[in-house]
Amino acid sequence: MVDTYHEGGSDDGSLCDCPESLFAVRLPQHWWVVYAAHAFEYDSAAGGIRKFFDNHNGLTNAETEAAFAALGLNDLSTYFRIAARIYSRYSQILEDADSSGMPDAELSELDYEFSLVLSAPYRLMKKSGDPRATAADYVRKNFSLYI
């Protein structure tokens, strides 16, 4: 992970807009749970779930899904996994379309479709619990781990 940060990108060579993700995945689970809830809420509040995925570039998907499960937000964890799969697939399609020289209008239409498809699991995620509030409860219950 550290090498990835210094090279300026993720394992697939693309840039990662949130380099703290490269280091956060090495945190002990009780810290990671809190970081994951915060990062998800912060980024998704700033621009939806796509903002979260764009910023973290898939580097923290498995850990974020596990953090939601550790918080007892099992539905949220499931919907997050679905959204991550959609994001991964559509991102590749968009990348391939862009590199093949697809006209901008068609690329924009595909990008819009991507956003629509991704919005369905995101709406379900928003109804599945508040990660930060649940993380706060988790910290209170496990406070001895944090001191």
Image (cartoon, helix red, strand yellow):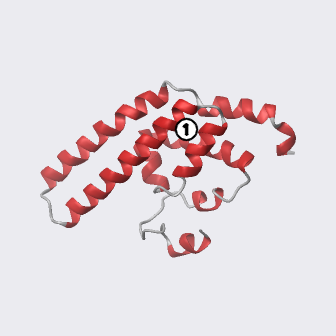
- Where's residue 55, x and y in %? 47, 53
- Under tag 1, what secondary structure? helix
Which residue is located at x 40 percent, y 47 percent?
Answer: 85
Residue 41 lies in quadrant? top right
* Total numbered labels placed on residues in the image: 1
Which residue is located at x 28 percent, y 44 percent?
Answer: 114
Towards the viewer: 85 or 53: 85
Amino acid on which the number 1 mark rests in the picture: Glu
- Where's residue 91, x and y in %? 32, 54
* Position of the C terminus by quadrant: top right
Residue 7, relative to residue 143: is it above or below?
Answer: below
- Where's residue 70, x and y in %? 66, 39
Which residue is located at x 48 percent, y 62 percent?
Answer: 16
Which residue matches tag 1?
41
- Where's residue 61, x and y in %? 52, 50
Q: Badge 1, how many Cα within 10 Å: few under 14, some, many 20+?
A: some
Which residue is located at x 17 percent, y 66 percent?
Answer: 100
Q: Is residue 70 left or right of residue 93?
A: right
Towards the viewer: 8 or 81: 81
* Position of the N terminus by quadrant: bottom right
